[in-house]
Amino acid sequence: QVQLVESGGGSVQAGGSLRLSCAASRYTSAFYLMAWFRQAPGKEREGVAGIRSDSRTTYAESVKGRFTISQDTVKRTLYLQMNSLKPEDTAMYFCAYGVGYAEVLIPESYNYWGQGTQVTVSS
């Protein structure tokens, strides 16, 4: 089992920044992937950014140049730095953990999920 605990959400005005964190209880494999997903009311969950155990990153087109995913493997913590936030970034943000070499930005690649943290961006 892997427990994931997100923090760092909140309310900001458009153009502002937030940093999300996700603490993992353990890694179950040397070859893992972690990602941030988001889900707005009435919409499907979408992949925002992902990172593999070798630190290769992948971003959704909608956040490229604004969001940065990173990890601290000693602390087993995943981060998402979000800059230039837009109202359309408003959603519940979830951290996810999976193993192997699956596709990074699809929910089916992940076995474990956090409870989520709300991000609200006002115009």
Image (tube, grey):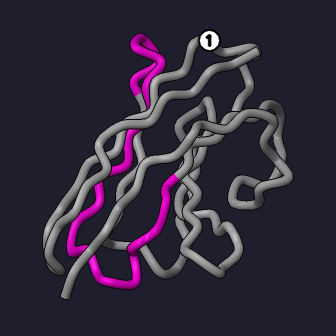
Q: Give the magenta-colored segment's residue range.
A: 72-93
Residue drawn at x 82%, y 47% as measured from the top left: 109
From the image, which quarter does the C terminus lie in? bottom left
Q: Residue at x 31, y 68 (%)?
A: 120
Residue 33 visible within the image: no
Pick out the residue farthest to the front.
41
Q: Dot 1 corresponds to which residue?
A: 26
Question: Percent from the top left, x then y, of residue 20?
Answer: 34, 45
| 87 or 67: nearer the viewer | 87
Answer yes or no: is residue 109 visible.
Answer: yes
Report whether 86 appears left or right of 101.
left
Q: Residue 21's spot in the image, x, y percent?
A: 37, 36
Task: Say what secondary structure mark 1 lies in.
Answer: loop
Write the residue at 49% across / 55% down: 93
Residue 81 within the segment the image draws in magenta: yes
The answer to which quarter of the image holds residue 65 is: bottom left
| 13 relative to 32 in the view: left or right | left
- Whether residue 87 appears in magenta in the rendering, the answer is yes
At horizontal 69% and vertical 19% (from top left) the residue drawn is 2
Q: Camera-side residue: 18 or 70?
A: 18
Tally of numbered tags: 1
**Quarter of the rendering containing residue 15:** bottom left
Identify whether 59 is placed above or below 30.
below
